[in-house]
Image (cartoon, rainbow, N blue to C red):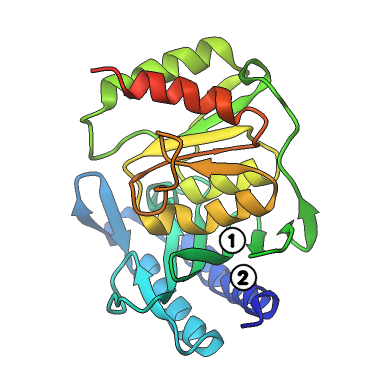
């Protein structure tokens, strides 16, 4: 496969679908929202965007299967598969609050090979493919060289349905509030990861996530020079429902803090 060509065509597709999302936001009202579960929302925008993405991705790599958040295409076990979130940050979107993003990854036999994140409100397209540099709107990006948590800006996401580890999460917030430049919660994990990749954050962590939230961003962070793992420092961050992404310089310190906090009973 020509991963460079696939990535660039996927980035172009994300921009086109992003135009649809941006247009719909201008007339969107909360009356158009459906509730999928506890604090879990969807609208016709998510569903239509996913249908548009699936149709386009089938043209780019016809042999690939899909894992897509809104279920507009059947999930299959093809070792080559697209992992798609048509609108990461739906709660932000329905309130008219940026950021919200399209997230698309291509996985080949459990290895990420293409990642694209299009943040709609700022018209920023982040992308990378296996073996490439990472890019933002055609310009190369990289993680920061900050070497201490004390000098870092941290991103996270609040749990919205799984509160089983809420005490540990609050303890982690307490630590980073006191020992870093601050903590930010943007409401879009895909955007958080893209921002680690381009140096706006030094680190991001969250639990309770799905593959479509993190797959594209994880690859982009790694190709930008960062490191990605689960809370134990291992590699189960796509399907393991937890992720740490850092600029690599603060990685060992950050993982140690999270591991200590979340191992507490």
Q: Is residue 262 left or right of residue 22?
A: left
Q: Residues within 10 Å of mark 1 (few under 14, many from 20)?
A: many
Please identify the quadrant where the C terminus is shown.
top left
Residue at image point 43% right, 19% down: 173
Residue linked to disc 1 = 118
Callout 2 secondary element: helix
Residue 259 visible? The answer is yes
Q: Earlier in the sequence, mark 1 or mark 2?
A: 2
Q: Name above or below for residue 155 compared with residue 81.
A: above
Residue at image point 66% right, 20% down: 148
Q: Name above or below for residue 167 compared with residue 15.
A: above
* Distance (Cα) linking label 1 and label 2: 7 Å
Estimate the x, y position of residue 97 in percent, counting from the top left.
Answer: 49, 45
All told, the count of numbered labels is 2
Q: Is residue 55 left or right of residue 120?
A: left
Q: Is residue 206 left or right of residue 14?
A: left
Estimate the x, y position of residue 15 in percent, counting from the top left.
Answer: 61, 70
Callout 1 secondary element: strand
Q: Name above or below for residue 106 compared with residue 226.
A: below
Residue linked to disc 2 = 15
Q: Which label sits on residue 103?
A: none
Instruction: Residue at the far right: name it.
Output: 139
Residue at image point 50% right, 61% down: 103
Contact flag, marks 1 and 2 (Cβ < 8 Å): yes
Q: Name above or below for residue 185 compared with residue 51.
A: above
Q: Residues within 10 Å of mark 2 (few under 14, many from 20)?
A: many
Q: Nearer the viewer, residue 103 or 6?
A: 6
Residue 104 visible? The answer is no
């Amino acid at each position: 496969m020509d991963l460079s060509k696939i990535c660039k065509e996927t980035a172009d597709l994300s921009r086109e679908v992003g135009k649809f999302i941006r247009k719909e936001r201008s007339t969107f009202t909360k009356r158009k929202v459906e509730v999928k579960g506890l604090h879990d929302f969807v609208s016709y925008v998510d569903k239509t965007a996913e249908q548009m993405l699936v149709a386009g991705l089938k043209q780019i790599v016809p042999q690939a299967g899909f894992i897509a958040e809104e279920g507009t295409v059947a999930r299959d076990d093809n070792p080559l598969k697209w992992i798609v979130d048509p609108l990461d940050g739906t709660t932000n979107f329905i309130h008219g609050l940026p950021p919200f993003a399209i997230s698309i990854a291509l996985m080949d036999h459990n290895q990420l090979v293409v990642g694209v994140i299009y943040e709609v409100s700022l018209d920023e397209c982040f992308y990378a493919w296996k073996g490439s540099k990472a890019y933002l709107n055609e310009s190369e990006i990289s993680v920061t060289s900050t070497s201490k948590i004390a000098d870092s800006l941290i991103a996270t996401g609040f749990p919205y349905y799984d509160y089983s580890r809420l005490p540990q999460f609050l303890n982690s917030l307490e630590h980073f509030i006191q020992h870093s430049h601050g903590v930010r919660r943007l409401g879009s994990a895909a955007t958080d990861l893209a921002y680690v990749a381009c140096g706006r954050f030094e680190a991001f962590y969250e639990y309770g996530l799905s593959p479509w939230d993190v797959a594209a961003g994880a690859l982009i962070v790694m190709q930008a020079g960062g490191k990605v793992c689960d809370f134990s420092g291992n590699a189960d961050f796509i399907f393991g429902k937890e992720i740490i992404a850092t600029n690599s310089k603060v990685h060992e310190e950050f993982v140690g803090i999270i591991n200590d906090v979340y191992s507490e009973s």
